[in-house]
Amino acid sequence: MKRLLTLAASALALAATPLAAQDVAISGVTVAKGDGSEPIANGAVVIRSGKVVYAGPADQMPAVPMQLVQAPPDTWVTPGLVAAVTSLGLWDVGAVTESNDTSAGKSPFNAALDVTPAINPSSQHIAISRAGGITRALVQGGSAGAIFAGQGAIIDLGADTDAVRVPRAFQKVVLGEAGAQISGGSRTATHVALRNAMIEAQAYANGRWDGADALLTRADAEALGKVISGRQKLLVAADRASDIREVIALKREFPKLDIVLLGANEGWLVAREIAASGIPVIANALVDLPSSFDQLAATQSNIGRMAAAGVKLAINADAMEQPRYLAQFAGNLVGLQKIPGAAGLSWGEALAAITSKPAEIIGLNDAGVLRPGAVGDLVIWDGDPLEVSSAPVQVYIDGVRQPLDNHQTRLRERYRDLDESDLPKAYDW
C-alpha cells in the first residue's frame, strides 16, 4: 500500500496543470497492451504529449527525460477500455422522461436522428464509467418508431465539456423480432422496409429521389446516403442465425455497405459464414438463456466459438446492466476456458475484446491499445483488471489524468461513518 501511495503522489505532482496532458513514465508494472498479446511482467509505459511513446519490457525502455515512477509489483497498466455500444450521456434517470434522450418514438425522423447535441458530458453515468476504466465509448440512441435508430457518436469520457470525438460515426438498424414489431409485425415487412430505404437513399445520393413517392423523409434519405456509399458504418442488430445470414446477404446486395453485426446471440451457428464475409461483430457476452425466439441457441460459448472460427469481434456493452462491467464480462470469458466443453477467450483476447477490437471495428485505430503513436488513454489498476476484486486507481485520457469521484463515491464517503448522535446527514451541510 505504501508503494501505491508513492505512485499516486508522484502522478499528482505531474498533474499540476489540470486538463493539460501530463508526461507519465511507469516501470515495474504488469503491462497489457490490449492488442491480444499476453501481459508483460516487469513492464514499462511512457506517455508524452498525450501519446503513447513506449509500452513493453522495462529493461528495453528507451531513456526518457522525465521522472520514472516505480509502482508496486501487483500494479497493472492497460489501455483505456472502449465501450460499444452504450447510451452514456443520453439519460440521467431512465424512468424520468425529461432526463431521457435515448429514444424519440414520436419524431417524424428516424435515420436522420443524431445523438451528438443530446450528449451531456456532465452525466454521472459518464463519471461512473470513467471510474471503471472506460475512456471511450460508442453512444447510440433509438427512434422506436422505425427500424433505423439514427446516427451514433464516439465520445471520450474525459472530465471536460468536449465529449464528442466523432459525431455521426455510425447508423444503427434493428432486425429480428424487435425490427419485425417496429416495421409491421413480421420479418417480411422488416426486409422490405430495409431494402426500400437503401434504394431510396441510393436514389437521393444520385439525385434521382422523388419526395412525392418516397416513404423516407428527405432528412432520412440524406442521412442514409452516407450509409449506402460506405462513408458511415451500419450497425445491424440481429441475433437469430437466419437473420445473420440475411445480413451477410445484404452486404452482397449492397457491397459498399460498411456493416458491423451487433448482438449475434446465435452467431456461433454461422460463425464460418460471418468470418468469410469479413463482417466484424460486437457480440453480446454470456447470454445463455432462450429469453426470446431470436436466441433459442444462445450459449455462453458463443463468443469463444466465433473467435475460434476467425470472426473479428468485440464485447457489446449494451448487453450488460452498466458499461463498467465490461472487464468482469471479459474475465468470465477467460474463466470459460477452464470449463470442459466450453469455449472462451485467452486473457489477451479478452482484454482486446474490450479495448483495441471495438476501437478497430468502429474505425478508431489509434485507441484501445498501448503502442507508439496511440492516444494516451491509460488505466492503472491495483491488480489483474479482469478480476472482479481489481479496480482502476488512475485513469488518463489523451494523457490527462482524470478524476474518479462521482455521486456514488461521494455518497459512500458521506455515509461511511454514521454517528447516530449527530443530526441526519441531510442537515449536515
Image: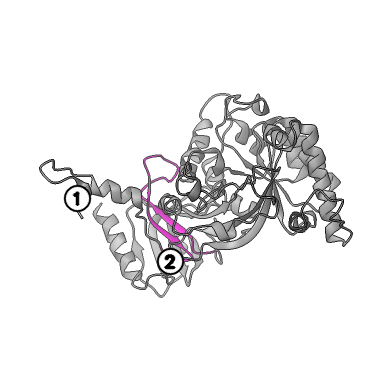
Question: In the image, residue 327 lies at what x, y percent?
Answer: 47, 43
Relative placement, left or right, of 10 versus 367 is left
Q: Is residue 221 one of those drawn in magenta?
A: no
- Callout 1: few (<14), some (14-19), or many (20+) C-alpha neighbours within 10 Å? few
Magenta segment boundaries in residue numbering: 375-401
| Residue under label 2 | 400
Residue under the point 86% across and 57% down: 209
| Residue under label 1 | 427
Say which amino acid is labelled 1.
Answer: Tyr
Residue under the point 40% across and 66% down: 25
Determine whether label 1 and label 2 are within 8 Å by CB: no
Q: Compared with residue 351, is residue 338 higher up or lower down, i.e. above or below?
A: above
Residue under the point 64% across and 42% down: 144
* Colour scheme in use: one colour
Say which amino acid is labelled 2.
Answer: Val
Relative placement, left or right, of 234 versus 200 is left
Q: Is residue 389 one of those drawn in magenta?
A: yes
Kindly tell me whether residue 367 is visible in this rendering: no
Question: In the image, residue 135 lies at what x, y percent?
Answer: 49, 56
Residue under the point 40% across and 52% down: 131
Q: Secondary structure at mark 2?
A: strand
